[in-house]
Image: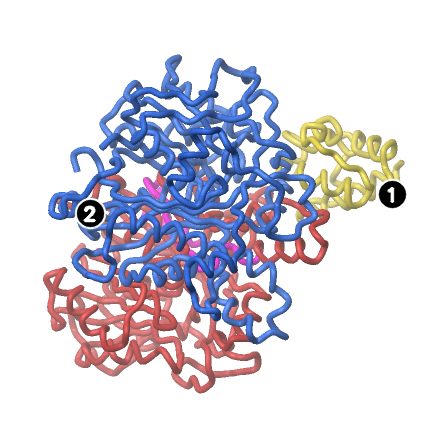
Amino acid sequence: MKNPCYINGIGAVNAQGIWNDDPFAHITEISNPLTMAMQPSYKELIPPAMIRRMSKGIKMGIFASQQALDEAAMDQVDAIITGTGLGCLEDSEKFLKNVLDNDEQFLTPTSFIQSTHNTVGAQIALRLGCKSYNFTYVNGATSFESALLDALMQIESKEANQVLVGGIDEIAGRTFALKQLVHEVKADGAVEKLKDSQSPGVNFGEGGTFFALNTEKRENTYAQILEVSILNKLATEEVVDFVTSFLTRNQLTLADVSAVVIGNNGDLKYDIYYTTFCTLFANQPQIFYKHLVGQSDVASAFGLAAAAFVLKKQIIPKTIQWNAIKLSELKYVLIYNQYLGKDHSLTLLRHVET
Amino acid sequence: MEELKEELKGKIIEVLNLEDISVADIDDSDALFGDGLGLDSIDALELIVLLDKEYGIKLSDPKQGKSIFESVNTMADYIAKNRTK
Amino acid sequence: MQNGVAITGMGIVSAIGNTVAENLNSLRNAQNGITQVDNFDTSLRDKVLVGEIKLSNDQMIEKLQLPVDNSMTRTGLLGALAAKQAIVSAQIDMVSNNYRTGLVSSTSVGGMDITEKYFYAYENNPELHRYIASHDAGVSSQHIADYIGLKGFVTTISTACSSAANAIMLGAQLIKSGRLDRVIVGGTDALSKFTLNGFNTLMILSDTYCRPFDQNRKGLNLGEAAAYLILESDEIVLKENKKVLAYLSGYGNANDAFHQTASSENGEGAYLAMKKAFNLAGLSPRDIDYVNAHGTATPNNDLSEGHALIRVFGEQVPAFSSTKAYTGHTLAAAAGIEAVYSILALQNDVIFPNLNFETPMGEFQLLPQTRLLHQSVNHVLSNSFGFGGNCSTLIFSKA
């Protein structure tokens, strides 16, 4: 018998600020090509001796992970698993620029040390004094889902009872200037909300989203994670089969799904994947979220947070409704994400009676 | 010498991002590592680069830093004796 | 999975050979692959030695028969060479879609070799734009998947120098959980100015041949490499009558939670990782015939790992060596190539020497194996530790 995997706590830092009791009530839809996270104060959480070296990615990761642990009333975990598409980009760029600009002279170690992709997971472990399993995934838009699948396997196999899992990505100057050069990110000066997108590319954001997972449910449990599936590429005409075979493997039909969470980001070329996906769920509520946090390799972690919130509260806030359909009872929520037609993932959640 | 010590304190604060500390907070004889300022081995590597970049002093073995970086006093002494710029 | 997860294929490129056979030959004959940096310009050329693969990107592109407008970086190219060998050695037909197949790769630098070359050049060179997306670590895995014709589960792990060990671990978990039937697992990392200078700032690069576990060790030689194993479920092995090279019988990951880069003096993380691996394998320390140590030859690692070995094995530490004096420290790929060496030790009943060792360390009585040793080898333990206190242990057992 597999152990169940419950979401007992959530933490986040992103363009909307930090995770709270009503995270979708007072929102500002983003419309800039690059939207930074609204940073909270870190002084109460991180001692000055540590904070002085930390880039914003590390700080966001520490903040969001602690928020998740606090909500779940967990102080130790059996695994820390993170996902990040681009890693600690600020420090990587800083060190690379120093190498190139100073002709390999007078280089200092701090930014190099912190450029390592597993820095956030390692810093969380260091902070918690946590000597257990510590993995980091770096696989584009499935970086977070890879971490989540690992977490699920750790819990199912009884290797771990309490797991901290999260995704972090930060925006840094040069890398994103290059992304704009190839029209992956909208050009400077563009002001387009997700639903009004007309120019090539998407609006990017940054942030960290963490989940405290547990084999035991509590009064404030959000939802149960049932399964995660990852596929590196998929043609649009294969989307239907990807979804139906996933549901079949989980002994569900399309009609069993109460609502879906979609990763639309305003990309004129690739949002067709979501349109195709949504044709399967024309009679169910559809939920979107990237208009709040922007695109990033780990934005879908916030999609999971939205799904978990909706399942717990049994309401879909107006600010994240994609279509007009409402359902009274939400049992299963299915999350679909892809980026540039690659790195597809499906995540299935179930409502938990507490 | 006093001038060098003041300059050194400013530079230490700058390269190590000691945000909450000012030049006046550091005593010439304060221990930089351990109980004093609480610096660590990564800071020691940063200070080695500081010696090289600002004063033209090259240390090849990080262990040499241990006695040099005891305090602002010992650092200033070493720099005064060995600087090439 | 009584004996663990079956390994049915392997492939490798390293500074001591571009095939498994070439690597074995170099290991047997104590031929290291350590030289000056030849493939790119660096002001460190006269100051450090590296384990470099003497193939240019263009030569690899030719070997792989890639189109001229491909966007692969060195990390992906090395990975594709090694992954292809692994598939051939396991006699897998990637076209037929009979089994759920995945790729778990790992890298620390991703496309850095290209990024550092063209970082400021993209605006004026539209023909280079295809490389911009290749910087991303995960893209190297996608390129490898595309090259070998894999459509399915693909992911990438990056936990610094333990990355490939963790990729191997995840692959095993995916098979055990019933999610996949077959997983290609390993790692790839190319040398770059970025990593070379990064390690140089830590003052842990040796200006001469590295000397693991020697009292006078001065630091590590960096290297580049790629290696992949094919893990297959018992069902495939049975149904297809597959030849099993060895079994992955145990694995464990733990965190030292001590310091961002340095290991704790008593090797707590390493100790915990080894303990976990023994528990899973159902083996005890005296079952191990050979330890392929992490042994980077930095003052800190070898001291910490030595203490951890003594804590686990007591006075009876089995024959052990670090093969990094042959290949250099190949970062994310290290546990991959050392997995291949561990399997070669099992297949050939041989223990590879720890080159360049002269003087025992003062802190303990640990003497690495310094000559090629022929003896029965049934279980091999391989350690890999990375920045951020990431400690991993794999145990391989004879088929």
Colour of chain C in the rendered structure image = blue
> Can you say whether A150 is above or below B80 in the image?
below
Which chain shows up in red? A
Q: Decide if residue C389 is in sight here.
A: yes
| Residue B6 image label | none
Q: Position of residue C312 (x, y in %)?
A: 37, 21
Residue A144, by quadrant, is: bottom left
- Image mark 1: chain: B
Quarter of the image that includes the C terminus of chain A = bottom left
Q: Residue at x 40, y 53 (%)?
A: C81
Q: Is residue A258 magenta?
A: no
Residue at which label 1 appears = B85
**Residue C32, above or below C155:** above
User: What is the quadrant of residue A347 in the picture?
Assistant: bottom left
**Magenta residues (range):** A64-90
Residue plotted at (55% across, 56% down): C113
Disc 2 designates what residue? C177
Q: At x 29% / y 47%, what residue is drawn?
A: C89
Q: Amino acid at mark 2?
A: Ser
Mark 1 belongs to which amino acid? Lys
Report crowding for label 1: few under 14, some 14 to 19, many 20 or more residues within 10 A (C-alpha): few
Using the numbered discs, state the Cα–Cα distance from disc 2 to disc 1 in whole angstroms.
Answer: 64 Å
Res A309 visible = no
Compared with C200, C157 (above or below) is below
Q: Which chain is yellow?
A: B
